[in-house]
Structures are given as C-alpha cells and as structure tokens.
Image (spheres, rainbow, N blue to C red):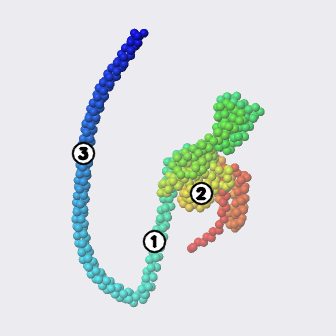
Amino acid sequence: MVTYIVATALALGAGLLGAWIGWFISRRIGDNRLARVEELAKKMIQEAEKEAEIKKKEAILEAKDEWYKAKLSFEREIQNKKMDLQKIEKKLQEGQANLDRKVDILNKKDRDLQNLERVLQAKDKGLKAREAELERLISEQNQTLERISGMSAEEAKKLLMENLISQARQEASQLIREIREEAEQNAEKEAKNIIIQAIQRCAADHTVESTVSVVNLPNEEMKGRIIGREGRNIRSFETNTGVDVIVDDTPEAVILSGFDPIRREVARMAMEKLVQDGRIHPARIEEVVSKTEKEMEQMIRDAGEQACFETGVHGFHPELIKLLGRLQYRTSYGQNVLAHTKEVAMLSGLMASELGLDPVIAKKAGLLHDIGKAVDKETEGTHIQIGADLAAKYGEHPLVVNAIAAHHGDVPAQSPFPILIQAADAISGSRPGARRESLENYIKRLEKLEEIADSFQGVSKAYAIQAGREVRIIVEHERVNDDGARDLANQIAKKIETEVEYPGQIKVTVIRETRAVEIAR
C-alpha cells in the first residue's frame, strides 16, 4: 500500500514537472515567434514607407511634367493669337490705306463733277437763250404762215391730224388684212403639222371589248357541278354576281353575259377560282365572289394609278384615280374608254407643248375628259356634266374643269385646252380600227339622223356632226318662230330616241336666224 502511494506521488510529481517544463518551453518559443513577427512587421512598414516616398516623388514629377506641358501649350496658343492679331492688324492697316486712296479718288471725282456742273450750267444758260430765240422765230414764222394761208394754227393742226389719222387707218387696215391672210394660209398648215406630229409620237394600241366572257373548263363534267342539284349552284352564282351564266353545247366552256363589265369581270374571276378549286356550292360561291369583289377594287385602283404613271400625270384625288380605274371596264363603240382617255391625254399634251401651253393641264384634262362615264349609269345627267362636277368636287384646276365641260361644245371655252381635247378626242375615236363600228353602219346612222331632221316642216338644212353625237338644224325663220324652234328640237330628239339605236347621247341644236343683206353699187 505504501509502495502504491509512493509510486502515485512520484508519478504526480513527474507530471507536474513535465507540465512546467512544457509551459516554459512553449513560452520561450512564443516569445521568439513574436520577436520575429515584430521584426518582420517593422521591415514591411519600412518598405511601405520607402515605396510611398518613391510614389510621392513620381507623382510630383508627373505633376510637374503636366504643368510644363500645359505651360508650353498655353505659350504656343498665346503665340498663335499674337500672330493672328498681327495679321488682322496688318489687314486693317492695308484696308485703311485703301480707304484713304479711295477717299482721294472720290475727292478728285467730286472736284471734277463740280467743274463739269459749272460747265453744264453755262451751257444750259446758252441753250435757254437759244430756245427763247427759237420760240421767237417760230412765233414769227407761224404768224407769217397764218397770214399767207388764211388759217389759224389750231385749224392747221386739226387738218394735219385728220390727214395723218386717215393715212394711219388705211395702212393699219392693209396690214391687218395682210396679217389675216398670212395667218389663214399658215394656220391650217401648222395645225395639220402639229396634229400629225402628235399622232406619230403617240402610237397607242387599239382595244376592243365585248359584252360576254368565256370561261374554259377542264372537262364537260364540270358543267354539271356548276349547275348543281336542281340548278341551285348556277342560281346562287347569278344572284351573287348579277350576270347570266349560259351553259350550252360549247365544248368545255361556259359563257358569262352581262352589260356591266365590272360585274362580268368579277364573275369571270370567281368562276375560274371555283373551277380550279373544285368546291362548288352556294356557301362557297358567296365566299369566293366576296373575295373577288375586294380583289377587283384593288385592281381598279391599280389600273387608275398605272394610267396616271403612263401619262406622267400626278396629284389626283384618290377617288378620281379609282374612277379612272373603273374606265378600264367601260367601252364606247367597242373601244376601251381608259385606253381612249390615255391616248387623248398624250395627244393633247403633245399638241399643248407644240403650242407653248402647259402640257400638264392638257394631260389632266385629257385623262379626265370622259371620267363621267365611270358613273353615268348610277348618276343623273350627261357624262360631261358629271365629269365636270367630279373634277370640281375633288379640287382640280378650273381650266381642267372647263375643258371637261366644253370638250363637246356644251359650254363656252375659257382657254385653248377644250379645243385641244376636242381634237385629240376626235383623233383617238376616228383612227382606223379604234372603234368597232363599221363604216357602213356609221354612214347609215348619220344619214338616218339627217333624214329624221329633214322630215319636219320648216327645216332648211340638217347636219349630223361630231361623229353623230350632235345634229344641227337650220330652220326657215319665216315659218318657225323662237318658241317653235324649241318645240321642234324636242320633237326631233324624241323621234331619234324611238327610231335610232346609238350609244351615249345625241345633242339636237336648232338654229333660227334672220339675215339682212344689201349690196352697195
């Protein structure tokens, strides 16, 4: 037991001794490390201070360098400004010297003018004296002439003026007659040359339209699908398009008939789409016709814009452009009206240029002269009145409006443009092949119009003019009075309506006049 205690005490003492020795060694090691760390920190601080000192010196040097550069730049700028000021000063000195020279020259001229004025004043005094002497001599001569002739000065002056006026009138009359004769000789020749040049430069194609359209079919079976069960498809198509569908023995084709060319074209396009698609029933027909009508509106607008582009005329109101496009599907005597208006625009523009007139106004008037035909079936009045109203409504030039209204002679012309439109209209309509009407039928219609007019009592002569658009009738003034002339025009117009077939309208003009003729012997 004692031995165990002693061993325990020894072990405890050894542990305490070991712990003290470990603490002592650890402390010595920590002090050494702390000393090394402190020494390292001092070195780092010294190096940082040295580096900061170096950077400080570098910053100071850079600042000095920037200051030196700025100084040099400022000195150069000051030097340049000094040089500029020296140049300006030199120019001012030169200018002052020039001014001094000019002042000297002006002073010299002023002295010369003063001398010249004194000379002129002296001459003026001499002239006044001479004028007084001349007036005295003329007065003496007039008194002598009055005494010799027995007439006063006023009477002699009046006689002289009468002689001079009579002589001047004779010479003026002769000159006017010569000018008129020369103008009459040259006018027809010049007019023909201008018209020939315009026709040669405007080579428009002729287009002829009809009142039917033919739609080709892929096979005969398609006719039955177009007709449909109990005819419901064809009835639906005719109701939606407003045209007649003729299904006959024509192989692989159906015919669309209608007097409205726009409706007929819509029907043709819709029929071709239905045939190509193959689905033909009332609902599909209504859908396709509706889409085709929208396409037709765009095609009409494009046709109007193309006509403006081809003729070089711009600035029309959009509604006028749309109405122009509608003329693409309107015909007159078989001639396409839009092609006709483009040709008239080109011809009138060319003739206006030759005459020194504004070709733009002439082209506009030519392009719009038949614009009323686009809506004459929907609006009351002649196409001339409708066209003039439309042009005025959409802000066209007054000369253009007058040219449209006067191109058939219905209203007085306010400028040469209506005459140009009349000439271009006649050229375009009368060119060979432009209109489908045969010469034989044309002559028969003119003869029929004159025959109807001659059948009334009191008619002296009747003339069908303007390609059969107007009949002018001269009556015997002893047998027909003014009221009777108006009644006669009405009767002839009604008889023409019942007996003659014609497109458009025919104007009936009755002329009654009294002439008094005497012969000087």
420 or 73, which is in the foreground?
73
Q: Which mark is residue 367?
A: none
| Residue at the outermost front position | 2
Lower sequence index among marks 2 and 3: 3
* Residue 195 seen in the figure: no
The residue pinned by badge 3 equals 64
- Residue 421: x and y in percent read 56, 54
Image quarter (top left, top right, bottom left or bottom right) of the C terminus: bottom right
Distance of mark 3 from mark 1, alpha carbons? 104 Å
Mark nearer the viewer, 3 or 1: 3
* Label 2, label 1: how far apart the Cα atoms are: 48 Å
The residue identified by callout 1 is 171
Q: Position of residue 312 (x, y in %)?
A: 51, 49
Q: Is residue 444 found left or right of 342 in the rendered image?
A: right
Which residue is rendered at x = 25% and y = 51% of the image?
74
Cα gap from disc 2 to disc 3, whole angstroms: 84 Å
* Three-letter code, disc 3: Lys
Is residue 29 depicted above or below 11 in this figure?
below
Proximity of marks 2 and 1: CB atoms separated by less than 8 Å: no
**Residue 188 versus residue 339: which sits nearer the camera?**
339
Q: Nearer the viewer, mark 2 or mark 1?
A: 2
Query: Is label 2 in contact with label 3 (beta carbons under 8 Å)?
Result: no
Q: Which residue is mark 2?
A: 392
For label 1, the crowd category at 10 Å Cα-Cα, with few meaning under 14, some 14 to 19 and many 20 or more, is few
> Is 419 left, or right, of 275 in this rendering?
left
User: What is the quadrant of the N terminus in the image?
Assistant: top left
